Each structure stands twice: as structure tokens, then as C-alpha cells.
Image (tube, rainbow, N blue to C red):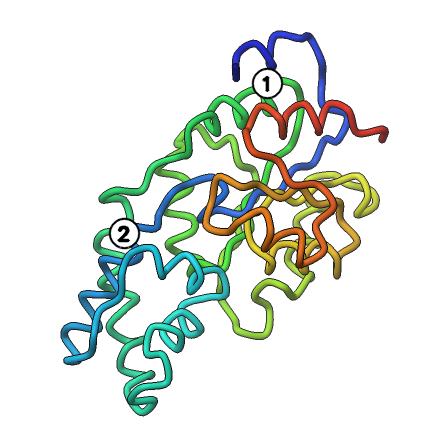
């Protein structure tokens, strides 16, 4: 299915594509859950099922830790944050892999002239490390992760800066591709077109409720949508 869609001879007319990382490019849920559960266990707190982490991730480590505590023992929040960063960093690539069809999507976009970036609320050093490990050929020209609470998504400034760096003359000449309501809001604030994807951490209903106008189910559909953009 993927290769058939890419053999149509089309070229993307939307030349700047910025991807979210976790839940869009890569399935990192198990590594995140296991690392944070290890930290909860060290603090003598209840661990959580892996599936619950789908609704905890996406807004940076401090917010994830706050949600993992669930209102219990709020005085342990700074300690949980302190424990979580190195423990997740030690296992960031243990189980994390690109989603099926995503490597082909990225390769075809790059081959047809698109300029690509990654914008994540994962800590910046881990965003760079993970992206470069999964795509060592440097296909992503710009990579930005969380480095300041005031600038994490949905704040639009990093997205706008990245789009300009990659050659978009206006926000409308770029596209943000993501899987969470946070990504929807980031694109809205930046006036950047958005494509939501359902293979990640959130449901179609979550994205539509957040205001997404396009929600797609397969990487090949994303490629076709980018080819069809009248830019």
C-alpha cells in the first residue's frame, strides 16, 4: 500500500514539513512507561499501566511527572523529575522504533525535495539523540526539543523559527504533522497547516475535538495529502 502510493509520480508542493517525534515518527510508549514506572517504584508509589501513558505524554517531562503522581504526594514531584530524566535517557532506544510506513514517508519526502524538521516536547538532548539514531543520514535538517517551559508546545515560536529556517516564506508554506491536541494547538497558534495522525498516542476523536481538520490513518495518506496541497 505504501509503495503503491509513492509510485504515482507526484511531488509534494508543500516543501517544509515539521514532524512531532513521539507518537508521530516513533513509538516510544513502552520505553517511557517502563522508565517512569521504575521511578515511581523507587519512590514507593504505585506504577501505571503502559496504556495510561498515552494520555500523560506530549507536554514535557514535568507535566508527565505531575500526571504520573496523579495528585498523590505532590512534594515528591521535584524528586520524580530528577529521577526520570537520567533513567529514561538510559533506555531511550531500548524498544523505540519508527512506526510502520514512516521511514518510507520520510525518505520519499526528502527525495522529492521537501525540507524536514522535528519539533518535540521531549527534552532537547534526547530529541536529538533519538532522531539522529533512527535517521542517521541527517534527513532532518532542524531538530528542536524541550529546553524551557515557556517555549514548549503549544507555544508557536520554535515552530515558526523552524519553518523560516527551512525556507518557508510564510507559515502557510509549511505543515506540522502530529498526533496530539497539543500539536493541533501549536499549529493553530502559528497559523501553520496541520495534519493529524491516528497511528500514535491519541485517538481520531481527540484530534477532531481539538480542532484538527485533517486526520489521517496511514503514512501513505500523509504523503498524498502533501502532494495535493495547492501551494
Callout 2 secondary element = helix
Q: Nearer the viewer, residue 127 or 216?
A: 216
Question: 45 left or right of 153?
Answer: left
Question: 152 left or right of 209?
Answer: left
Cα distance, mark 2 to mark 1? 31 Å
Residue plotted at (83% across, 45% down): 170
Question: 114 left or right of 231?
Answer: left
Q: Nearer the viewer, residue 55 or 75?
A: 55
- Crowd around label 1: few <14 · some 14–19 · many ≥20 (10 Å): few
Q: Quadrant of residue 45?
A: bottom left
In the displayed structure, 69 sits above or below 23; it is below
Q: Quadrant of residue 126?
A: bottom left
Residue plotted at (27% across, 51% down): 31
Q: Nearer the viewer, mark 2 or mark 1?
A: 2
Q: Position of residue 210 (x, y in %)?
A: 67, 59
Per the rendering, the mark at residue 74 is none
Q: Which residue is mark 1?
A: 111
Q: Which residue is mark 2?
A: 31
Q: Position of residue 185 (x, y in %)?
A: 68, 60
Q: Nearer the viewer, residue 156 or 102?
A: 102
Callout 1 secondary element = helix
Amino acid at each position: 500500500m505504501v509503495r503503491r502510493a509513492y509510485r504515482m509520480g507526484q511531488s509534494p508542493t508543500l516543501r517544509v514539513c515539521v514532524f512531532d517525534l513521539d507518537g508521530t515518527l516513533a513509538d516510544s510508549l513502552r520505553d517511557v512507561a517502563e522508565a517512569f514506572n521504575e521511578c515511581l517504584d523507587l519512590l514507593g508509589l504505585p506504577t501505571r499501566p503502559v496504556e495510561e501513558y498515552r494520555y500523560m505524554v506530549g507536554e514535557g517531562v514535568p507535566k508527565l511527572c505531575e500526571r504520573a503522581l496523579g495528585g498523590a504526594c505532590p512534594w515528591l514531584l521535584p524528586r520524580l523529575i530528577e529521577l526520570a530524566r537520567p533513567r529514561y535517557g538510559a533506555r531511550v532506544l531500548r524498544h523505540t522504533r519508527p512506526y510502520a510506513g514512516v521511514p518510507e514517508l520520510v525518505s520519499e519526502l526528502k527525495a522529492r525535495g521537501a525540507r524536514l524538521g522535528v519539533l518535540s516536547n521531549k527534552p532537547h538532548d534526547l530529541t536529538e539523540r533519538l532522531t539522529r539514531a533512527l535517521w542517521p543520514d541527517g534527513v532532518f535538517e532542524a531538530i528542536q526539543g524541550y529546553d524551557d517551559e515557556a517555549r514548549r508546545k503549544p507555544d508557536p515560536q520554535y515552530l515558526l523559527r523552524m519553518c523560516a529556517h527551512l525556507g518557508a516564506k510564510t507559515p502557510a508554506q509549511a505543515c506540522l504533522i502530529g498526533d496530539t491536541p497539543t500539536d493541533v494547538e501549536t499549529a493553530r497558534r502559528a497559523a501553520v497547516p496541520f495534519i493529524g495522525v491516528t497511528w500514535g498516542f491519541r485517538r481520531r476523536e481527540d484530534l477532531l475535538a481539538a480542532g484538527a481538520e485533517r486526520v489521517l490513518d496511514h503514512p501513505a495518506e500523509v504523503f498524498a495529502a502533501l502532494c495535493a496541497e495547492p501551494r
